[in-house]
Image (tube, grey):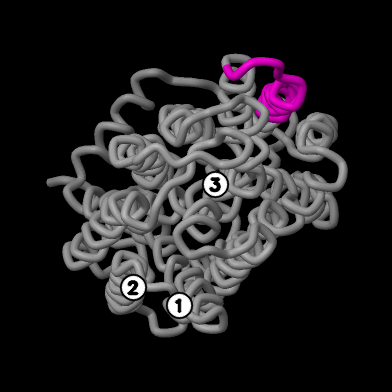
Amino acid sequence: MRSAGGPPTGRRRLALAVVVAAYVLSFFQRFAPAGIAPDLVAAFNTTASSLGVLAATYFYVYTVMQVPTGILVDTLGPRLILLLGGLVGGAGSLLFGLAATFDQALLGRTLIGLGVSVTFIAMLKIIAVSFDERRFASLVGVAMLIGNLGSVLAGAPLSWLAQLTGWRGVFVGLAAVSLVLGLACWWLLRETAPGSAGAASSPSGSRPRFDRTVVLSGLLLVLRNRDTWPVVCVNFGICGSFFAFAGLWATPFLTQAQQMTRSVAANHVSLYFAGFALGCVVVGTLSDRLGRRKPVLLASSHLYAAIWLVWLSGTTLPLAFSYALFALMGLLTASFTLTWACAKEVNPPLLSGMSTSVTNMGGFLAAAILQPLVGWVMDLRWQGGLSDGGARLYSTADFQAGVLLLAATAGFGALAAWRIRETNCRNVWQPPA
């Protein structure tokens, strides 16, 4: 990271490291319901649709916050919003961990989503304005690799810890972590003047400011750009189906439809996240080295969509094969990370925050719709089966109806990839005549 008159390079690197650490926490909070789904059902006696709403509340807020976050990052810089994000997310985690009722848990989950929703776009902005654009996908891939530690921890490790110590204590502890990271971002980052080269600092006395006219014109420019929307659609299809499945329904699907134990199902989810983490680096680096975006997106997204047909068939797979398939799905899912580079490269460089946030909104909107919708469809088909504890049990046929929605969404994302504009890893935006 560079900026004239900024703090020492070591401090700027530390600042970026802290932001990435906050991103790890964001990933953990995003996928935590999958690791503790049985505990949440037992604690609040929920149906599948209610569990879907509880998990998706995070995505509702995250979706709504994407464009405002992009605007704030482009105008005010990341320092203040990262501090506020840490405070709000910490409060939400504390409330979620202490919730006595389902409504309190919903409110806590809402605050968590609000707090962590600012982290990723702030991180993208720092990378976008501070490094060579030809390395953008690679650097984002590395950041995603590190961030995915949170998703891996939200799988088997969280499931094990929840059974050992209880899930509530985990979220109370995360409240303190969120607060510390927010304060660290405030201390290490420096305010950025609009249009300055540095993402994390600016000369003293140069304070960022919010210009409503400039903001609205910039946002309209991004939204009116016809090259923006195919990228949003790919993110909607690939990222959305990933978040809905891995973020909630994978563990119930594997335990009930595939007859796996909870620990084996959690291992599958962790392997999915590990494959995704590796894929973020592989896909980004491959694209940067080829100097192409579209061929990588097309191949990965179509193969990813095809794998959903296996789960749609309802076949019970050998354990080794199901592990391999989950790892491959994770690797291929990472193709959607190229959409941020594609969005940045077809819009004005100074609007990188807005363009990436609009794109990011697609996947979170899909997850917000799909998580409760899958549960609702399963509840419609439910035949009345109950566990010993009184929780609903769903058949393979029930899950197939939900998986069909996810498969169709993934297929939509793959088809949308054909409409993406090839940028050759360069910014190709031209001012309108």
411 on left or right of 206: left
The image shows residue 158, relative to residue 137, as above or below, that is above
Q: CA distance from mark 1 to mark 2?
A: 9 Å
Residue 192, given in percent of the width and then of the height, sits at 63, 35
Q: Amino acid at mark 2?
A: Val
404 in the magenta segment: no
Nearest to the eye among marks 3 and 2: give it.
2
N-terminal-most mark, 3 or 2: 3
Amino acid residing under circle 3: Lys
Which residue has dot 2 on it? Answer: 310
Classed neighbour count for the residue bearing mark 3: other residues with Cα under 10 Å, few (<14), some (14–19), many (≥20): many
Instruction: Judge by depth and name the residue closer to the eye, 159 or 236.
Output: 159
Q: Secondary structure at mark 1?
A: loop
The residue that label 3 is drawn on is 125
Check whether the beta carbons of the residues at disc 1 and disc 2 lie within 8 A of each other. Answer: yes
| Amino acid type for the residue under numbered disc 1 | Leu
Question: In the image, residue 210 lies at what x, y percent?
Answer: 49, 21
Does residue 126 sit above or below 77 in this rendering?
below
**Front residue (pair 16, 299):** 299
- Residue at 49% x, 33% y is 62
